[in-house]
Each structure stands twice: as C-alpha cells, then as structure tokens.
Amino acid sequence: MAEKEKPLLIKRYASRRLYNTETSDYVTLEDIAGIIRAGREVQIVDLKSGDDLTRQYLLQIIAEHESRGENVLPVNVLNDLVRSYMVPGGGMMPQFLQSSFEMLRESQKKMVENMTAMNPMAKMPGFEAMQAQQEAFLKAMTGGLSGNWSGPSPDDSDDRDSESSEDLEEIKKQLADLHNKLSKLK
C-alpha cells in the first residue's frame, strides 16, 4: 500500500496532546481538519490503551466548526441524525449518508473528467495547470471530499454526453429511493 493511501497515524498522549507520527510534531484539531481537507485520511489512537479515537475527534472537529457559526450540517439533518440513534440498530442513516457522499464524490470526479474531455482547450499549453486550479476549486467548494473513483476511465467511453446523462439519472433515482426509505422510517 502506498504511503499516501494509508491513514495518517495520530497518537493521543495521556496529556491529551495529539502527535503526528509522520512529521514528529504535535498537532491541533484544526491541523487535523486541514489534513483531511487536503484529502488524507487520519487515524487517531490512544497511545496507552490503543483505542481508536478517530470518530470521537472527527465529531469534535465538526462540533467546533458548528460552534464558530460555520454551519456544516443543516438543523434538519442534525435532527435526523439524532433520530437515527434512537432507532434500534442505527436505522438506515449511516448507509444513506455513506451512499450520498459516494455519489457526490463520483459526480465531482465525473464533472472534472467531462470538463477535460469536452474542452477543446485541453491541447493548449498550460491547460494542466488550469485544470489543477479547477480541481482545487471544486475540492474547496465540496469541503475537500475525497474518495477513489471506481467507474470507467476517460478512455472507456466514446459517447460521454449520453452516458453522463444516464449516470445523472441513475444517481437521481438512487437518491430518491434512499429518500423514500428514510421517509418510511419517520
């Protein structure tokens, strides 16, 4: 496994300080949020017990952003999350959220690929730099969502417009199905 694919190991000491094992220095929650926004996964473990504390710290990062007025999640989504904890077994909310974010990442990746494939400027010098700026912009607009695209490569399709339209319709259908299932739980 390549080094960048492995989660960055952060150790929490008894003093509750967080230690980045790659850079050999202490980090803050904001530093960890920046690492995640840059596309890197993290794993936070307690040095003494070995317990995985990643979920706890990720929730704390979200809570801190919310307390500063940076509305990460709308109130109705937060209410639905709380309700999902009241359903035995957690309900469908975790699967719904995971599927929704996967669809968002796939759509984002496909949009970047389509911009490149359909753009006649792609053969111009310096286009790669401009494309990198566009990708950085999209990453910033989506909060740095990361994920690996598992769909076809750009070379696998001759008719991108119709395929893109079909993919979008399929995504809409899947999202509507998930929404209907979630509505039935209420």
Image (cartoon, rainbow, N blue to C red):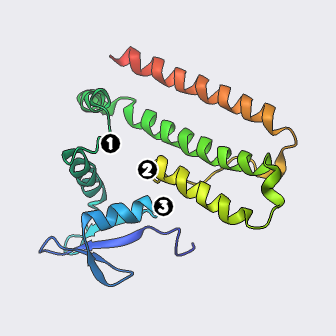
Left or right: 8, with 27 as reference point? right
Does the CB distance between marks 2 and 1 fall below 8 Å?
yes
Residue designated by label 1: 72
For image coordinates 72% across by 47% down, the residue present is 115
Which badge, 3 or 1, is on the more N-terminal residue?
A: 3
Left or right: 122, with 179 as reference point? right
The residue lying toward the viewer, choosing from 158 and 177, is 158
Amino acid type, callout 2: Gly
The residues tagged by marks 2 and 3 sit, at their Cα atoms, a distance apart of 10 Å
Q: Can residue 51 be seen in the rendering of this structure? A: no
Q: Can residue 9 be seen in the rendering of this structure? A: yes
Amino acid type, callout 3: Gly
Amino acid type, callout 1: Val
For image coordinates 36% across by 18% down, the residue present is 185
Image height of 54 relative to 85, above or below: below
Image height of 48 relative to 143, above or below: below
Give the image location of residue 35, x and y in percent: 40, 66
In which quadrant will I find the C terminus? top left
Q: Secondary structure at mark 2?
A: loop
Which residue is outermost to the bottom?
24
Foreground label between 3 and 1: 1
Give the image location of residue 69, x and y in percent: 23, 44
The residue lying toward the viewer, choosing from 135 and 51, is 135
Give the class, few, some or many, for how many residues have Cα within 10 Å of label 2's Cα (few <14, many ≥20).
Answer: some
The residues tagged by marks 3 and 1 sit, at their Cα atoms, a distance apart of 18 Å
Give the image location of residue 89, x and y in percent: 31, 33
The residues tagged by marks 2 and 1 sit, at their Cα atoms, a distance apart of 9 Å
The label number, if any, that marks residue 39 in the structure image? 3
Residue designated by label 2: 143
Q: Secondary structure at mark 1?
A: loop
The residue lying toward the viewer, choosing from 144 and 47, is 144
Count of number-bearing discs: 3
